[in-house]
Amino acid sequence: MHTSIATVSLSGTLTEKLAAAARAGFGGVEIFENDLLACPLAPEEIRARCADLGLSIDLYQPMRDIEGVPDDVFARNLRRARHKFELMNRLGADTVLVCSSVSPDAVDDDARAAGQLARLADLAQESGVRVAYEALAWGRHVNTYEHAWRIVEAAGHPALGVCLDSFHILSRGCDPKGIEDIPGEKIFFLQLADAPLLAMDVLQWSRHYRCFPGQGGFDLAGLLRHVLAAGYEGPLSLEVFNDVFRQADAGPTAVDAHRSLLLLREAAGAAELPPPVVPTGVAFAELLTPDAEPVTALLAALGFTRAARHRGKPVDLWQRGEARVLVSTAAGARRDGTRLAAIGLESPDPAAAARRAEALLAPVLPRRRAPGDAPLEAVAAPDGTELFFCATGRPGLPDWRADFADLTDTPAGPATRTRIDHLALTQPWHHFDEAALFHRSVLGLTAHESVDLADPYGLMRSRAVTTADGSVRIALGVGAAPTDDTVHAAHIALATDDVVAAARAFRAAGGRLLPVPANYHDDLAARYDLPEAELDAYRDLGILYDRDPGGAFRHCYTETVGRVFFELVQRDPGYQGYGAANAPVRLAAQHAGRR
Amino acid sequence: MHTSIATVSLSGTLTEKLAAAARAGFGGVEIFENDLLACPLAPEEIRARCADLGLSIDLYQPMRDIEGVPDDVFARNLRRARHKFELMNRLGADTVLVCSSVSPDAVDDDARAAGQLARLADLAQESGVRVAYEALAWGRHVNTYEHAWRIVEAAGHPALGVCLDSFHILSRGCDPKGIEDIPGEKIFFLQLADAPLLAMDVLQWSRHYRCFPGQGGFDLAGLLRHVLAAGYEGPLSLEVFNDVFRQADAGPTAVDAHRSLLLLREAAGAAELPPPVVPTGVAFAELLTPDAEPVTALLAALGFTRAARHRGKPVDLWQRGEARVLVSTAAGARRDGTRLAAIGLESPDPAAAARRAEALLAPVLPRRRAPGDAPLEAVAAPDGTELFFCATGRPGLPDWRADFADLTDTPAGPATRTRIDHLALTQPWHHFDEAALFHRSVLGLTAHESVDLADPYGLMRSRAVTTADGSVRIALGVGAAPTDDTVHAAHIALATDDVVAAARAFRAAGGRLLPVPANYHDDLAARYDLPEAELDAYRDLGILYDRDPGGAFRHCYTETVGRVFFELVQRDPGYQGYGAANAPVRLAAQHAGRR
């Protein structure tokens, strides 16, 4: 099926948008009029540019306030249309979008609207183009697709059809089932946009908050099924007005957009993608650092031991129980300082997991980083984090540890119960919604509600993506402003059976815990009836406490090295969260530590 | 009257917030619980810090989900309250805010709620504190101030009163007149917040979009009059949850906040401020530049002549007709490059204008920049632009031109009709609403609707502030992202009677006009029935065209020097706008020119 995107959905100049759309794999574009007006290229040059890029121009849009008007106004409108049809011929665009009128001149008279649209279609036909009439959700008299179709049907003109736009239909709560009553060949165009379910003015909602399919709350797959059932065979085209996308680099936005359409087709049963392979655990986290010393000191204090060294690269494997951390001093570390660069996910079928990621436009990383390395399936997440699909000690699958020499068993005992509870990653500000959709659709994780976290210098947001059993938990975080992605660090949370013991051991080994103000623990005493000794230990160690209907969560933080810190957590089995209620205190303490 | 601000309204740590509030002139604060919990200072130390700063702690807030609950839950709530009352004693806060319950445990039983609040008030009284009960707009059972008052009245306890919050009252469309039925001494506290009139979920609206009085759409002066009529004598306190203020420097935000309260009191007839002195024209615009050559070449091409030179400083006066531009190469220019640094406003009473500005917390600039200079009343606007209140050739008032030597008359003739049509200033992203309030309240200008302008790389906003007759027009602009204030330049728009002639003369004199794509003019031809010759001239010169019910607007732009460019405009007398419809084309062309 042909995919398309309206140029208004992407940031930049028209030529930047076209290049980004083509690179992301779209087959065509809708040319948004203002993008054309601001472009120094002549229409013929734009046409040639699109052809070079392999893009068809599927729609020219929009024409507004055409129909249902007094005759003298309509005469002026026809004059305007004649100019636009000539332009479309120069551009090589054969379909124009006409939005239902919002003009105060428009009268509530379907026969007049139909008659005028038929005359417009006559003119279009003479120019070899056709008219797709769309009901805006806030159209003055015509604001439902059923009404637009009644008018198109009454006009009965071969060059006149409807354009369906999922936002205009679903934002009004209209039932899309009636789409099946429209003959497929009279649906000239389909525009797709999702949106978060906000209770707000529909015009503002439409102009600022639309998003790509799967990133909002609409049932777009359901709508698409009805459109396909009607016999529609035209492009699936995205038209998304979004303040964030307007600012973001067009390249990644276009990839995000195209991925969302691939997923929508899958959800509607209209496309076959390799099925998701849900990971079953975290094999390792990899830290990239220009200077291993501070990181390894921290790991040692956390009870990790150096278990192995990579045969060909400056990468050490540190291990405690089931928690494994790779420390790499490879090239590239110097630029960004110490950071969480890669995650190994235990995968039941690494190759299949990589196939799905590749089909969903994730950049595939070289399978072998050096000659002689064991093959590793890996892709890049939208934030640049490398995701390795791996097997640890599973017969019949290559073990990623085969590249490491001197693998020793770590000491037995209670310490070995340590595992990675969750990983927290800071996302690029303009791509937070993309990140959630990526982890959900590519990795088969479940995305949970987004929560606000009050940092002293602005509201952050955080959204968890997890497996059903919690074996993989990733918290995607984003700062308050586009520039914040360098401020907030990523972290690795280690699950322990006894956070008090773990924190004491860490401190005894020379580790530094994040200090927490006494006022916080006074408040804990007010809110919860905790034993005095327990509270004293929490005060002493800077342990935070939260509770939900499923149980309690106790957690504390290490100092930060570069852009990474660790968290020690003790999670009751039924507790679902990540201690979000404590985030303001933790974030303030981390700011204070940076002074 | 005592003014106060909730610490949640400001960005930063608790101590940063306290310092900013004190510097801005607040008499007290509400301590927001999360700010205290995250603060490493003990409550006694916070109390001492506030005392040092001259701040009273007027409220501790909030306590939630206290009342109308089963007995066992209430017993736990009392235990929590006891802790908080002890904390308040340490802090020296005598009033606590209790928000109406949102808990699913709460039952719809006023008698139970009143009884439990009375018991809470007993406990409060024992601790020497009192309870202010507030109806949240989304309270589970209690969500109007009338209902909260009925419960407080039924409880009949001296340590229990109501807290009124303008947002919770006005967001629900409640009539504030009934406030006068509450005895003034039972109104324990008044929280004030404005908000833009958004049709959206009230909880989201409250938590993210509140703003300072005068920056939104609520009639806060009307509400305040009712509260004062009831006999309330407590603090006027701001409680504003706003995503932007959370990120902005606390210092300027606190000044903005305090100014808004001063204005609110004036609007409610509760305070005397020096009255506004509305300017009657633009005396000059001053450009600060490290290198006068490119700027003066541009001015010369625009038909300006160097009319005078300052006696003591490197400042030249350039003039064309009534348009005057000062070009300064004084210190400070090197850092920021060429920029619009100051505006001279014709003022009927410069000293009185400065008195109002000073009373409204505008920093007053030295009256004489050098010994021997004529005295000049000047203040700094929130964006740092220096505003001079001046008189040009008016008997009995010092003329700012007295400091300039060799003042010559400029040539007579049609060119002398030139004047400054408007000035466009780029505002710091976090202080856009402040800027509009400042210009409206300090200068007595009228603020018009904010409009979105689609820059290729994000949505900008622009809001005009003007005198009624258009003699002063300032367009306040803001970029799409906090970092954009260095991207967008300021500009000076020169009014001409014939923009085609002015543009031709400029080009003939060697000036470079901003090129406009042919596609734009093709569209003009489609939309308007303009004479071919006129359209040809527009194409040739890059002239843009707009029309509103009052008339037409023709405009074109010069190249940009540093962070300043000029616009030539021909405005029909009835046209009200600034060519916003053409902004996307202009902005795209300016981006293209920077490549």
Image: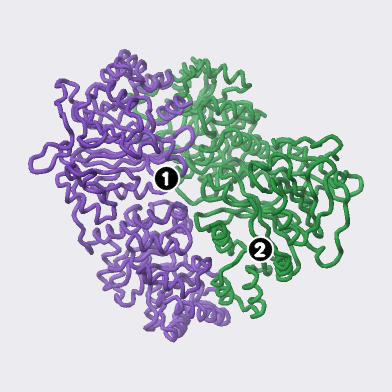
Chain colours: A purple, B green
Secondary structure type for disc 2: loop
Q: Is residue B527 left or right of residue A26?
A: right
Secondary structure type for disc 1: helix
Name the chain letter of the residue that bears numbered label 1: A
Residue at (12, 36) in percent of width and height: A393
Relative to the observer, which residue lies in front, A57 or B347? A57
Relative to the observer, which residue lies in front, B373 or A522? B373
Observer able to see residue A203: yes
A258 lies above or below B525: above
Residue at the disc numbered 2: B512
Amino acid type shown at disc 2 = Arg
CA–CA distance between discs 2 and 1? Answer: 38 Å
A48 lies above or below B242: below
Name the chain letter of the residue that bears numbered label 2: B
Measured as percent of width and height from the top left, residue B83 is found at: 42, 18
Q: Residue furthest right?
A: B395
Q: Residue furthest left?
A: A395
Relative to the observer, which residue lies in front, A96 or B124? A96
Same chain for mark 2 and mark 1? The answer is no
Nearer to us of marks 2 and 1 is: 2
Measured as percent of width and height from the top left, residue A340 is found at: 32, 36
Q: Residue B330 carries which label?
A: none
Amino acid type shown at disc 1 = Trp
Name the quadrant of the N terminus of chain A.
Answer: bottom left
Q: How crowded is mark 1: few (under 14 residues within 10 Å), some or many (20 or more)?
A: some
Residue at the disc numbered 1: A429
A424 lies above or below A160: above
Measured as percent of width and height from the top left, residue A593 is found at: 44, 25
